[in-house]
Amino acid sequence: MAAPRRQMWAGGLSEHSFLGMTLNAVDAKNRVSIPASIRELLGHRGDARSVVLAPAERADCLVGYDPGYTAKKEAELDARFVGAFTDERDDIFRMTFGGAEQVAIDDNGRIILSAALQDVGAIDRLALFVGAGRYFEVWNPHNYVARPTLNPRLARMVQRLIDARGAG
């Protein structure tokens, strides 16, 4: 069976997908560097100067995406809840859009995590960026590794990143 074809752009990164894992420190001013591969894809999608961060629907982490993806996210949720105006639907829309922040990326590739984003994502001194295709996630790496449903190979990969930082 042939591998699925994927559009590629200069630099070899997928035009459509956030890939890989990176562990970065959060400094005393709550700044964290966005991985270069994420910044490049944000720029390719149209806005390298900001990123949207929001609470994840089913995990204690943040989801991140380019500002243009917001309309796609709304369409996905509309399709999911077509004709159903329930408390669950309203809560998910509130969390997805009301809990979201469009965060500026500075000239050094860093963002400032607000207290609210740090709290909802349980982010402290380290931020684990995990590519998830159309979006990426930002985790407290210790919480990521502690998930009971996490594939053990992924847990080992992240634990190596944690150990390399001396934060085990």
Image: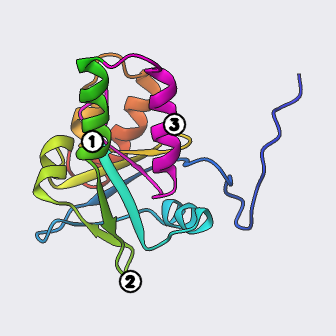
Magenta region, residue range: 56-85
Residue 49 drawn at (x, y percent): 43, 74
Residue 75 has which mark? Answer: 3
Q: Position of residue 121 (x, y in %)?
A: 21, 43
Amino acid type, residue under disc 1 in the picture:
Pro
Query: Could you tell whether 120 is left or right of 59 in the image?
Result: left
Label 2, secondary structure: give it: loop
Pick the front one: 119 or 167: 119
Per the image, the residue denoted by label 1 is: 141
Q: Which mark is residue 107?
A: 2
- Count of picture labels: 3
The residue at the far right in this view is 2
| Residue at x 72% of width, y 60% of height | 12
Image quadrant occupied by the N terminus: top right
Indicate yes or no whether the magenta region holds residue 64: yes
Looking at the image, residue 94 sits to the left or right of residue 46; the answer is left
As for residue 31 lying within the magenta part, the answer is no
Left or right, residue 98 beside residue 132: left
Q: Is residue 38 above or below residue 6?
A: below
The type of residue carrying mark 2 is Asp
Element at label 3: helix
Earlier in the chain: of badge 2 and badge 1, it is: 2
Which quadrant would residue 60 be assigned to in this image?
top left
